[in-house]
């Protein structure tokens, strides 16, 4: 058993080294990465709500640098209710576009995630929270969902983070 863990840890270290050098993960690698790091991408809705930031009032302008200049999953709120879940390669830019296109969102929150697994994680959150503005129903997100279900008794949803 310890040899297998050592092999998995070595594989993960190799993947992390490639990521640090700026290489993209292939399909097999991001699935390994997600199996090991899913907890860093899994939050319950109250935690996501607690992390949200308010958009600037439309008349006062919007801070264009809201959000990180990295990729991941973002959550849009109106009156404290989750309305939309999306993914972006540059979250700050995508939040800015949403504000210009539909200025009725009043809060946003996000989770940084590698681009290679962002779609899997986005689909998981759309299926889990069923936000009303996400009109399409998704067939992806199974890996993330199975990881969460398999560890359902593990209270590791990052409270207060």
Image (tube, grey):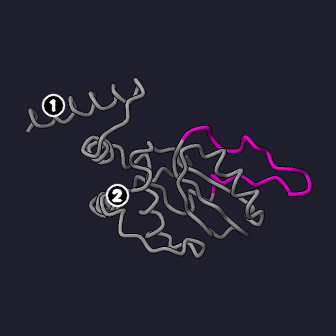
Which of the two discs, 1 and 2, sits closer to the camera? 2
In the displayed structure image, the side of residue 140 where residue 13 appears, left or right: left
Query: What residue sits right under mark 2 in the picture?
Result: 144
Query: What residue sits right under mark 1 in the picture?
Result: 6
Quadrant for the N terminus in the image: top left
Locate residue 139, reporting x and y percent: 36, 69
Locate residue 59, reporting x and y percent: 91, 56
In the displayed structure image, the side of residue 126 where residue 103 appears, left or right: right
Judge whether 11 appears above or below 148 on screen: above
Main SS, magenta region, reads: loop
In the displayed structure image, the side of residue 18 where residue 62 appears, left or right: right
Q: Mark number for residue 58?
A: none
Q: Is residue 58 covered in magenta?
A: yes
Q: Which residues are magenta?
A: 50-70
Q: Is residue 6 covered in magenta?
A: no
Residue at 67 percent of width and 56 percent of height: 108
The crowd level at tag 1 (other Cα within 10 Å; few <14, some 14-19, many 20+) is: few
Query: Across the whole image, how many numbered discs are drawn on residues?
Result: 2
């Amino acid at each position: 058993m310890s040899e297998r863990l050592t092999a998995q840890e070595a594989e993960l270290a190799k993947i992390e080294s490639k990521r640090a050098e700026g290489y993209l993960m292939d399909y097999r690698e991001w699935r390994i990465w997600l199996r090991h790091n899913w907890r860093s991408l899994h939050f319950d809705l109250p935690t996501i709500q607690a992390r949200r930031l308010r958009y600037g009032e439309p008349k006062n302008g919007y801070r264009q640098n809201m959000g990180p200049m990295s990729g991941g999953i973002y959550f849009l709120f109106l009156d404290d209710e989750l309305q939309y879940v999306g993914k972006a390669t540059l979250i700050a830019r995508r939040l800015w576009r949403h504000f210009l296109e539909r200025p009725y969102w009043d809060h946003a929150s996000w989770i940084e995630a590698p681009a290679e697994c962002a779609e899997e994680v986005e689909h998981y959150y759309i299926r889990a929270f069923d936000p009303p503005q996400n009109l399409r129903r998704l067939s992806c997100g199974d890996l993330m969902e199975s990881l969460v279900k398999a560890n359902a008794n593990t209270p590791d949803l990052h409270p207060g983070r």
